[in-house]
Amino acid sequence: MDASFWNGKRPAGVDNTIDPDQYPSVLSVINGFLTDNAARPAFTGLGLTLTFADLDRYSRQFATYLQIHTDLQPGDRIAIQMPNVLQYPIAVYGALRAGLVVVNTNPLYTAREMLHQFKDSGAKALVFLENFGHLVEEVVGQTEIKHLISTQLADMLPSPKKQILNFLVKRVKKMVPDFELPSATPFRNALALGDLGTYQAPTGAKLSDPIVLQYTGGTTGVAKGAMLTHRNLIANMLQSKAALSQKGPDGQKIAQDGHEIVIAPLPLYHIYAFTVHLLCMPLNGNHNILIANPRDTATFIKAIKPWRFTMFIGLNTLFVSLLNHPKFKECDLSGLKMTLSGGTALQEATAKRWHQEAGCIISEAYGLTECSPAVTMNPAGELAQQGTSGLPVPSTELKVIDDDGNELSIGESGELCVRGPQVMPGYWQREEATREVIDSEGWFKTGDVALIQEDGFIRIVDRIKDMIIVSGFNVYPNEIEDVVSGHPKVANCAAIGVPDDVSGEKVKLFVVKSDESLTEEELIGWSRQYLTAYKVPKSCEFREDLPMTPVGKILRKDLRGMVETA
C-alpha cells in the first residue's frame, strides 16, 4: 500500500512525510539538542537531575576519554550493559560522539548470552555495571574486548549520597558478587581523564553507516544484530516527533516541546526505549524520569511521586503492576495526557482499567527492532482505536501479502510488510538471514499477520513466527529448546507461549524424558543456569511423544492447539 493511502487519515498536526536526509548524521542531531536545550532538565535518576548542559559536558568527557585513552577507532563496537541509570545516556552519547557503534546489551543476560553477543558483534570495549562484573570476568577472555569501563549504581550522585548508596548495594544488600577485573577503568575516572583532554569531533560519517547494533532473535534461535544506520535512527526520530505533533481540539499541540515530563521504566537497552528516551524525547527537549528497576513497584512509585508527569511509556505488565499497588493512587496523575504502550499486546482489560484509574487513554503502538523500531502508532486521546496498533508513522509504506507473496486487499489478513527509511539495511554479517526478510524492492517481512482497515488503522491478528513475548521481550523457542535438550535426562522437547495475566505470555515446556527420574523442578533449575529469568520456562508437561511432521519437525502449533482446547 503506497504511503499516500494514509494522507488525510492522520490526526491534525501530523505530517504525512519526513525528510531523513535533513541532518548529516545522528551526531549532528545530538549536538543540536544538547546545545539548544542546555538549561532544561534532561534525565532524572535516583533523585538526581542532569540538564542537557550536564549531559553535553559529561558525554564530551567520555568521548574524549575513548579517543585519547583507548585505541578505539570510529566504527569500532562498544557494548553498554546497564539498567536505567544516568551513566547510560552519558555513555551512549559519548560513544556516538567518538564515532563508535553502540551494542546495547541486556544486563539480565547470562554469561552464555553475553558471550555470543560480544563475539558476534566484535565489540572491543564494554561499559558495565559492577553488579554484572562476575559474568564479565567469566567471558571477557573469550572475546575481542580490550577496554573495560566499570560503574556502580550511584556513581553520578554527589557525595556522600554516592558512597552511602553504593555501600548499601554492595555490602548490605550483597547485590555485587565478587569479581576481579583489575584493568577496568572506573566510570568517574574515565570522565575525569577525559576532562583533561581535547575532544575531536569525528569526520567522514555517512548516513548509511551503522551506529547501533541492536540484537534480536529469529526462528533459528540465533541472536542477530540489526544494523541501524544514522539515516534509520534520524528517520524514526523525526517520524516519532511528527506523530507526537498531533493537535488537540483547541488547535494546540498535545505534546509541547521542552515541557513534557516522561516516565521511562522500560530498559534503555531495548530499542523501543532507546529510540524514545535517548533520541526522540531529547530531540523535543523533554525530561525523562529513569526507573532503574521497574519490577520493584514500591520503589518505582516512590520515584515518580514527586513529579506531575505528563507522559508515560510502558507496556501491559507495568500498567498492571502499578494499578494493583495501593500506593499508585497517591501519585499526581492530573497532568497525564499521553500513555504509550508497545513491545507486547495491550490487554483490553488493562486498557480500560488504566483509563478509569489514571484518567488517560492508552495509545498502543507497533514496531520491530529491524525498523528502529516504530512502524505504527495510535493517536493520543479519543482518536486512539483500542485493539489496533494505530496508523503508520509518516513516510512508511505497508502491505499485506499471502503465502505466495501476492498483495492482499483492504481488510484481508496476511503477512505484514514494511518499507520506509527506518528499515534496517540488514543483519550484521548475516547476508542470508537478511535476504530472508528483505526483498529486492526493500520490503521487510515482519512475520506478523495483520490487516489494514478501510480507515487506515492496522490490526495485528497473530504471529507467523513461533516467538513468545514475555513482558515485551522476545523469547525464541529454539534457544530454550537448545538449553533444555542439553539436560542428560531429556530425549526431546518443545517450548511454546501460553497466556499469562501479568506478563502477557509465559514459557511452557513439553518434554519427553530419557530418564524417568527427571522432575519439573530439576528442569526449571537447569534452565535458570543458562537463560535470562524471563526466558525460563514457568511450567513443564511431560509427554510420551511430541507432534511432528513426517520429516521430524516438531509442530508447535499443534501443542498450542492442545493448550487452547484443554
Image (cartoon, rainbow, N blue to C red):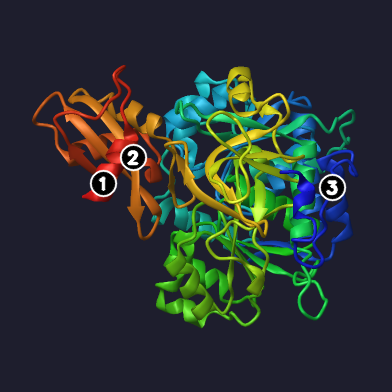
Foreground: disc 1 or disc 2? 1
Residue 418's disc is none
Question: In the image, is residue 367 above or below residue 255?
Answer: above
531 or 344, which is in the foreground?
A: 344
Q: Which amino acid is tagged 3?
A: Val
Residues at marks 3 and 1 touching, judged by CB atoms closer than 8 Å: no
Q: Position of residue 525 (x, y in %)?
A: 25, 39
Q: Which amino acid is tagged 2?
A: Ile
Can you identify the residue that label 1 sits on? 563
- SS at badge 1: helix
- N-terminal of the pair, mark 2 or mark 3, is 3
Figure label count: 3
Residue 496's disc is 2
For the residues labelled 1 and 2, the Cα–Cα distance comes to 10 Å
- Relative to 282, 133 lies left or right: left
- SS at badge 2: strand
> Would you say residue 145 is visible in this rendering?
no
Can you identify the residue that label 3 sits on? 29
Decide: few, some or many residues near mark 3? Use Cα within 10 Å; few <14, some 14-19, many ≥20: some
Residues at marks 1 and 2 touching, judged by CB atoms closer than 8 Å: yes
For the residues labelled 2 and 3, the Cα–Cα distance comes to 42 Å
- SS at badge 3: helix
Residues at marks 2 and 3 touching, judged by CB atoms closer than 8 Å: no
Q: Position of residue 478 (x, y in %)?
A: 39, 29
- N-terminal of the pair, mark 1 or mark 2, is 2
Q: Quadrant of residue 80?
A: top right
Decide: few, some or many residues near mark 1? Use Cα within 10 Å; few <14, some 14-19, many ≥20: some
For the residues labelled 3 and 1, the Cα–Cα distance comes to 49 Å
Residue drawn at 8 percent across, 29 percent down? 516
Question: In the image, is residue 170 above or below residue 522?
Answer: below
